[in-house]
Amino acid sequence: MSELAIDVTGLTKRYGGRSVVDDLRLQVGAGRICGFLGPNGSGKTTTIRMLCGLLTPDAGQGRCLGLDILRDAAAIKRQVGYMTQRFGLYEDLSIRENLDFVARLFQLPDRRAAVAQALERLGLVERQRQLAGTLSGGWKQRLALAACLIHEPRLLLLDEPTAGVDPKARREFWDEIHRLAARGITVLVSTHYMDEAERCHELVYIAYGRVLARGTEREIIEQSGLHVWSVQGEGMEALVEPLKAAPGVLSVAAFGNAVHVAGQDPALLDAALEDLRARPQLQVQPARANLEDVFISLIARTPDPFAGTGAGRA
């Protein structure tokens, strides 16, 4: 791997006696886009906040941008752009005023030039006088990214940055992320969208605070050992729940007009699908596993350590 922008091991954070992040190891090469995936409450946001110095780990060690995550948290903050899940700028200030405020926080020596460059980079010049509170989701997203970049960070930590924006805005956002990576900026981005995960150079999937899979899209799919069948035809809705309960079936998920049935044991899958193959109105064919198949199956075979304890997720 090239020079590592993130290299941490044993990262742990506990709340109320439970580990929200549990012995996590994460390595991301400089200039790479790493997708950070997992269900709600899996520990993604907590991990991101520990990496940028907003939270202190209870255990673990490592470096971020060559700096010690425990001793050099303040220095790390100055070299990281962190985009939160929710819009965090002032809605009663204009786009320009918000960017000027952020530039003041970072004590940038040539503040006016930095603001002008940020406006130009994200296509915000014509809207610079508009109040942030009147912007659509996509334009708020652009403003938030401009604020993240104004101090020329070497690492971007993006926490579900495209939630609630339209497909066009999401595509434009990802085009910009790839341009930034081409300039050598490292990006760690959490997302629930599988099409976005496919645009990352590498992926890390966590659940219950632990890493369940890591690698490129192709590596994760190949390592999963999943066998997948596509079932299509009339009356599929009534078959979904019985299929989920069948031995050897790890996941059943709808994809358009078809349903993907996935598992690791080919013999058990054949037994689960035997009755369906005999129905003339149904088509049962082998299919290639995709990321969604893999991630749903990972959760299905990973026990929830907090089930029945009454503990909420963070």
Image: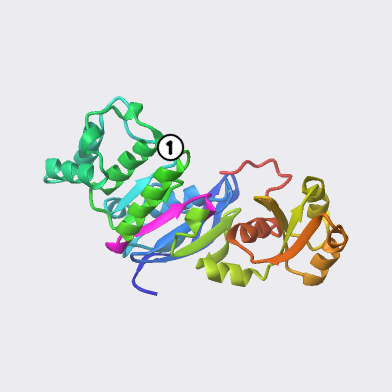
**Count of numbered labels shown in the rendering:** 1
Residue 224 lies within the magenta run: no
Q: Is residue 213 left or right of residue 296?
A: left
Q: Is residue 100 visible?
A: yes
Q: Residues within 10 Å of mark 1 (few under 14, many from 20)?
A: few
In the picture, the quarter occupied by the C terminus is top right
Which type of secondary structure does the marked residue at label 1 adopt? loop
- Looking at the picture, does residue 70 appear above or below residue 92? below
Q: Tell me the quarter of the picture where residue 126 sits.
A: top left
Q: Who is closer to the viewer here, 287 or 300?
A: 287
Q: Is residue 253 visible?
A: no
Q: Is residue 232 left or right of residue 99?
A: right
Q: Magenta region: which residues?
A: 182-194
Residue 184 lies within the magenta run: yes
Residue 174 in the image, given as x and y percentages of width and height: 39, 52
Q: Tell me the quarter of the picture where residue 139 sits.
A: top left
Q: Who is closer to the viewer here, 239 or 69?
A: 239
Taking the spot 57% from the left edge, 54% from the top edge, the residue there is 209
Residue reaching furthest to the front: 280
Residue 59 in the image, given as x and y percentages of width and height: 49, 58
* Residue underneath mark 1: 86
Report the amino acid beneath label 1.
Arg
Q: Is residue 240 left or right of residue 107?
A: right
Residue 66 in the image, given as x and y percentages of width and height: 31, 65
In the picture, the quarter occupied by the N terminus is bottom left
Q: Is residue 26 left or right of residue 228?
A: left
